[in-house]
Image (cartoon, grey):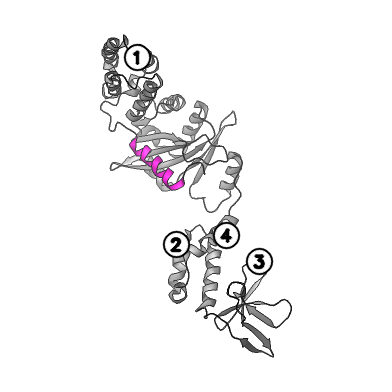
């Protein structure tokens, strides 16, 4: 009779002749069928003078049961001690012993493997500062944790990347930056996931992932100072930057990369003007003014004011029946008239930040929202 670890800590399971037994606590030498509660099995084994006397079971033997239990123990151990995918662990161990592996089901053991993995992980931190300590002392993430940024007013960010991605970033002349709020955890508090992407053979590649606890110019300044320390070539190489229209981010990018062409995303511009159009309850009026407005980014910056005059003329024709359209024109002038160089995508290598938006969509599919 062989002794193996039981399901609960400090317990044991006994194997003999392809049956599982648990010890009868009333007797030192009596072992009862492990499945007696579910199968009402009367089977037992009595060990006396190194001889085993069996009472017949009412169910079939469990082929390769010892090997199965040992394989399960190995799966649980690897779940605790490695970061390998659970299914990959299961498949790898089953391939080593296909005879026993055919009786195992990943669906059955997956929850146990997941629980073991969770036990080995640190508790979820309550603050970004607590997260620093975990990342700095974690062997699993040491290859992607690059640094932290702390501003003079105590605000902070965590930078994640790899040496290979930083090397790719060092040779690019274009970057695409944006923040997302969709995949943030419930805790610790994180204001946004800010990411920096490059374009390689018309394919977007995310190179930096930054967890920020605020969205201020001070933090962005400190962040780009740190990034250019990690990638010294970036400051002189960058010729084109595409971002959203967040004021703090744009101000910081202009300061750090004064010689780069900083352009907003045509899609984000259209989203902004469409939101204003709907807020003013203009959805049911002719769309001529809205359509003309959405084409503004296609013009060179020096034609922007002339285009606004043309749109104003069209709006004046509709103002008699729809006076709120004049509020829309005021919004255009107050919000966008001084941002022609930022809005214009004329002669830009790309006009939208689709590579970043696509990444955000895939991240939501993989990670879910508000984890």
Which class describes the residues within 10 Å of circle 2: few (<14), some (14-19), or many (20+)?
few
Q: Which residue is mark 3?
A: 9
Q: Which residue is mark 2?
A: 88
Label 2 to label 1: alpha-carbon separation? 59 Å
Label 2 to label 4: alpha-carbon separation? 15 Å
- The mark that comes first in sequence, 3 or 1, is 3
- Label pair 3/2, CB-CB below 8 angstroms: no
Residue 172 appears in the picture as rendered? no
- The mark that comes first in sequence, 2 or 1, is 2
Q: Which residue is mark 4?
A: 116
The residue lying at 55 percent from left, 41 percent from top is 186
Q: Position of residue 112 (x, y in %)?
A: 55, 62
- The mark that comes first in sequence, 3 or 4, is 3
Foreground of the two, 138 or 333: 333
Label 3 to label 2: alpha-carbon separation? 26 Å
- The mark that comes first in sequence, 1 or 4, is 4
Magenta span includes 356? yes
Q: Secondary structure at mark 2?
A: helix
Left or right position of 371 against 163: right
Label 1 to label 4: alpha-carbon separation? 61 Å
Residue 23 appears in the picture as rendered? yes
Report which quarter residue 28 is drawn in: bottom right
């Amino acid at each position: 009779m062989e002794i193996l670890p039981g399901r609960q800590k400090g317990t044991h399971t006994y194997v003999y002749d392809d049956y599982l037994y648990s010890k009868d606590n009333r007797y030192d030498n009596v072992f009862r069928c492990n499945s007696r509660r579910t199968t009402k099995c009367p089977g037992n084994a009595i060990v006396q003078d190194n001889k085993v006397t069996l009472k017949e079971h009412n169910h079939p033997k469990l082929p390769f049961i010892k090997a199965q239990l040992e394989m399960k123990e190995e799966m649980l151990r690897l779940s605790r001690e490695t970061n390998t995918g659970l299914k990959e662990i299961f498949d790898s161990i089953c391939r080593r012993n296909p005879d026993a592996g055919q009786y195992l089901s990943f669906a059955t053991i997956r929850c146990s493997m997941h629980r073991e993995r969770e036990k080995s992980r640190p508790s979820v931190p309550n603050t970004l500062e607590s997260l620093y300590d975990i990342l700095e002392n974690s062997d699993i993430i040491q290859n992607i944790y690059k640094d932290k940024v702390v501003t003079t007013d105590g605000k902070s960010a965590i930078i994640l990347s790899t040496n290979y991605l930083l090397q790719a970033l060092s040779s690019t002349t274009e970057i695409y930056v944006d923040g997302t709020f969709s995949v943030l955890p419930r805790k610790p508090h994180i204001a946004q996931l800010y990411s920096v992407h490059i374009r390689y053979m018309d394919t977007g590649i995310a190179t930096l992932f930054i967890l920020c606890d605020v969205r201020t110019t001070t933090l962005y300044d400190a962040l780009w100072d740190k990034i250019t320390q990690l990638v010294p070539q970036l400051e002189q190489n960058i010729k084109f930057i595409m971002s959203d229209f967040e004021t703090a981010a744009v101000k910081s990018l202009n300061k750090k990369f004064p010689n780069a062409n900083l352009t907003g995303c045509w899609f984000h511009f259209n989203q902004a003007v469409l939101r204003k159009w709907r807020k003013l309850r203009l959805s049911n009026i002719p769309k001529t003014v809205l359509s003309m407005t959405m084409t503004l980014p296609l013009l060179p910056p020096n034609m922007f004011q002339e285009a606004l005059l043309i749109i104003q003329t069209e709006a004046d024709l509709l103002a008699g029946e729809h006076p709120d359209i004049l509020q829309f024109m005021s919004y255009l002038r107050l919000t966008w008239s001084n941002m022609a160089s930022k809005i214009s995508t004329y002669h830009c290598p790309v006009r939208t930040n689709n590579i970043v938006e696509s990444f955000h969509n895939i991240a939501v599919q993989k990670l879910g929202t508000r984890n």
